[in-house]
């Protein structure tokens, strides 16, 4: 299976997004006056802006081009605003849901955990990161995996606090989450102009 191994902080800077969107925190280096003109950017073309938005979404979710194109084609055929349908569909990926529920610190970690078979959907083990959840689905850490250090730290008084989006529900002291509704445009918590992606693929 192909993997996206691009350096996180460097790529975030290129795409003008915060590493926090990826689940990472970091300290910035002190600024210098060396080569100040090197920080100046040339005016971006229309195509460049469209491509940047597509690359941004692909990078955030760890999706490669072939699969991303498939998501777009399905969104274009579905009722509703194509760009919003596209983002909503990608947001429903199991690896993203695992991350959103706070079962992993980053989407990369979540994707690896899903690949290793640590999660069930409605009681059935699912090891496909791109699996799309639906309303009413219950995502849970497998019984055999709960004793591992990775998941033990997620329960109890010292458990890390995560902000779970409104379309998901999870009790702090459980390793179970439920999809209560479909994610909407308002649930996308990073800056993206999805209409530019639609324009790019519509050419």
Image: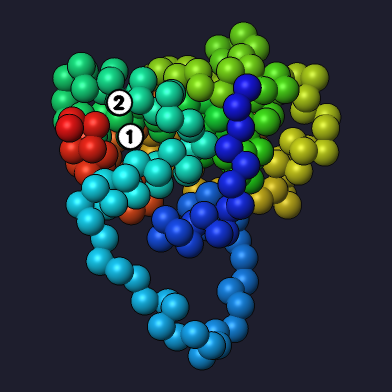
Q: Is residue 140 left or right of residue 63?
A: right
Across and down, in percent, residue 21 comes to: 48, 52
Residue 171 in view of the camera: no
Q: How is the image coloured?
A: rainbow
Residue at the disc numbered 2: 72
Residue at the disc numbered 1: 87
Quadrant in which residue 181 is drawn: top left
Across and down, in percent, residue 184 comes to: 29, 35
Kindly report the distance in space between the C-alpha atoms of the residues bearing marks 2 and 1.
9 Å
Please determine whether, in this image, residue 38 is positioned above or below residue 195. Answer: below
Front in this rendered view, residue 193 or 3 = 3
Please determine whether, in this image, residue 110 is positioned above or below residue 46. Answer: above
Quarter of the picture containing the C terminus is top left
Quarter of the picture containing the N terminus is top right
User: Element type at marker 2?
Assistant: helix
Q: Is disc 2 in contact with disc 1, using a CB cutoff of under 8 Å?
A: no
Q: Is residue 196 left or right of residue 122?
A: left
Quadrant in which residue 172 is drawn: top right
Residue that lies at the very extreme toward the bottom in this rendered image? 33
């Amino acid at each position: 299976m192909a993997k996206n191994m691009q350096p996180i902080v460097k790529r975030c800077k290129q795409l003008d997004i915060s590493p926090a969107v990826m689940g990472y925190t970091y300290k910035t280096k002190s600024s210098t006056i060396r080569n100040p003109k090197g920080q100046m950017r040339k005016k971006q073309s229309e195509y460049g802006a469209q491509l940047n938005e597509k690359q941004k979404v692909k990078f955030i979710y760890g999706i490669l081009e072939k699969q991303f194109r498939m998501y777009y084609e399905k969104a274009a055929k579905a009722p509703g605003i194509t760009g919003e349908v596209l983002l909503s569909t990608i947001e429903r990926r199991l690896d993203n849901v695992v991350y959103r529920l706070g079962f992993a610190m980053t989407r990369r970690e979540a994707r690896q955990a899903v690949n290793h078979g640590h999660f069930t959907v409605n009681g059935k083990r699912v090891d496909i990161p791109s699996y799309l959840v639906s309303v009413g689905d219950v995502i849970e850490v497998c019984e055999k995996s709960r004793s591992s250090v990775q998941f033990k730290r997620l329960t109890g008084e010292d458990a890390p606090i995560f902000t779970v989006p409104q379309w998901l529900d999870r009790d702090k002291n459980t390793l179970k989450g439920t999809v209560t509704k479909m994610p909407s445009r308002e649930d996308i918590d990073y800056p993206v102009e999805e209409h530019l992606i639609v324009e790019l693929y519509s050419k």
